[in-house]
Image (cartoon, grey):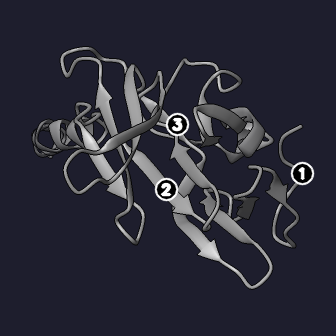
Amino acid sequence: MRSLGIACLILVAPAVCLADSEAPPTPVLFSTDSGYYFVKSIPESPSQRSQTAGMTRVYRTGSIKDELLCEYPWYARRLWLFFDGNELTLVRLGAWHRAGTAPEREIEIGFYRNGRTLKEFTAADIAVSKKNFVQSASHYQITSRATGIVQGRNANYFEIHTTDGRNLRFDLSNGRLLESPKQSRVGK
């Protein structure tokens, strides 16, 4: 019976380790719904283990040549672009947070416009408390999923869902957290 248990452990352990492995960073491209604007994020090097080193560039689509509008000195795999008719807003969700990294220094969500930062929230800002972190063998998670951009009658916002069940909405015009009945106090 003991050898059966050891055999099961030997068969299951590699699958658990593989499921907790990071995918290597790869170039990504996203556009607005209209296709008039797009963002391209390129990692510094696929062999480098950093999930955020690289360059992100925002373009206006041209008939012959695309126009570079702005750039940011980081890489992100999860990006959204929103154009409200006047302003173009870029939203990024942070990479997997490695165990042992300081949540106070890890970007969980950021809002950007015209090459500048509107607002960034760290993993610690969003989690509020250590009990809200979901820990795996080598990483921790705060955001369970993103609804993404939601266009409302009076405002446009970006919504994420946390691992502890909160729905957080952020104003796309300035990146600020909007009040929501299902949330704790977040950020500063």
Task: Determine if residue 173 is in view.
Answer: yes
Query: As drawn, is 35 to the left or to the right of 3?
Result: right
**In front: label 1 or label 2:** 2
To which residue does mark 2 refer? 81
User: Which comes before the other along the chain, label 3 or label 2?
Assistant: 2
Label 1: few (<14), some or many (≥20) within 10 Å?
few
To which residue does mark 3 refer? 140
Name the residue rendered at 60%, 46% in the picture: 142
Query: As drawn, is 48 to the left or to the right of 58?
Result: left
The x and y percentages for residue 67 are 35, 42
Q: Which mark is residue 185?
A: 1
Name the residue rendered at 63%, 56% in the picture: 87
- Is 42 above or below relative to 184? above
Name the residue rendered at 47%, 55% in the picture: 80
Q: Nearer the viewer, residue 86 or 170?
A: 86
- Do callouts 1 and 3 mark residues in contact (Cβ within 8 Å)? no
Task: Determine if residue 76 is in view.
Answer: no
The quadrant the C terminus occupies is top right
Q: Which mark is residue 22?
A: none
Label 3: few (<14), some or many (≥20) within 10 Å?
some
Query: As drawn, is 104 to the left or to the right of 108?
Result: right
**In front: label 1 or label 3:** 1
Identify which amino acid the numbered label 1 is placed on.
Answer: Arg
Q: Nearer the viewer, residue 11 or 67?
A: 67
- Do callouts 3 and 2 mark residues in contact (Cβ within 8 Å)? no
**In front: label 3 or label 2:** 2
